Image: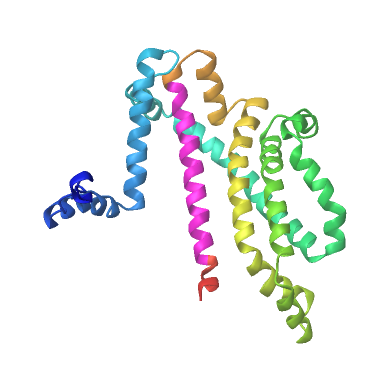
Amino acid sequence: MSAADVLPAPAVEPAESPAEIGRARLPRAAFGRIGIGGWRLIALVIFLLTWHLASIPAGKLLLPSPLDVLPALIDEVRSGQLLTATASSLQVFVLGYALAIVSGVALGVLMGGMPRLGEVLEIYVNALNATPRVAFIPFIILWFGLGLNAKIVVVWFQAVMPIVINTYAGVQNTDPDLLEAARSFGARRGQMFRYIMLPAALPYIVTGLRLGGANAMVGTVIAELYTALSGLGYLIAQFGGTFQTAKYFGPVMVLAAMGMVISQTLKILERRLTRWRSR
């Protein structure tokens, strides 16, 4: 008896036809044509669908459906309540955030450009960054009252630390060879700050601005809750305290949209300011 009579012949799988290969590649090609905007839209649809399905067993009081939130949002816009609150919160946010940008970038550049000053202040900056800023709100109210000034200080204090830390790190990571070459050509300290340190630190600064912007948004709500009630923070407290959960999501969605716009704007700004890196 030969080995061919004992061992079974290996099975030969039929080769895929070109038509079958083409059909397999069609879904991949279709997915490949979807841009980032399309994927974001798909993610949003999935999120809203999941939210709606989760709201069915939870009930309207615990978790209203997006179908309940939309009419409530329209009513808030028509009454002018949401627009007035948004304008009030934007004023506090813009003033506090702008103050944090100016002071945070300036202090971070000084700390990075003057190593001895940076070594002295770094430990205190990190300590303040690790401390919950809410703990300082009673003192801020004692010093600045309950009006607009107190809210601006709360937003500034909430946003300034990430800006300082990231700017300081960016200036510290400046290429030492570039600084040495600038010194050899007789560049002054101010010129090195402007033409070498700041451009090198731009990606770090923009990252700090994005983190600071998110913190400033949180600080705006905190300031409106702890000081004189107004703005979106007041609406959140009012709707939450009276269990108007459908209306509660209105100011929350506005805050999320504001944060998204700020983050995307800073990303575009970063791309435009750092084009020279790709050249």
Q: Relative to 207, is 149 on the left or the right?
A: right
Q: Relative to 136, is 219 on the left or the right?
A: left
Q: Which residues are magenta?
A: 247-272
Residue sitting at x 77%, y 27%: 138
Residue sitting at x 50%, y 56%: 267
Q: Position of residue 234 (x, y in %)?
A: 56, 25
Q: Is residue 57 above or below residue 3?
A: above
Our reading of the magenta stretch's main secondary structure is: helix
Q: Position of residue 219 (x, y in %)?
A: 64, 36
User: Would you say residue 259 sits in the magenta stretch?
Assistant: yes
- The answer to whether residue 59 shows anywhere in this view is no
| Nearest to the observer: residue 84 or residue 89 | 89
Q: Relative to 104, is 13 on the left or the right?
A: left
- The answer to whether residue 120 shows anywhere in this view is yes
User: Would you say residue 252 sits in the magenta stretch?
Assistant: yes
Corner quadrant of residue 222: top right
| Nearest to the observer: residue 144 or residue 192 | 192
Q: Is residue 274 above or below residue 133?
A: below
| Nearest to the observer: residue 257 or residue 94 | 257
Give the residue furthest to the front.
1
Q: Is residue 38 above or below residue 148?
A: below
Q: Relative to 150, is 17 on the left or the right?
A: left
Give the residue furthest to the bottom.
185
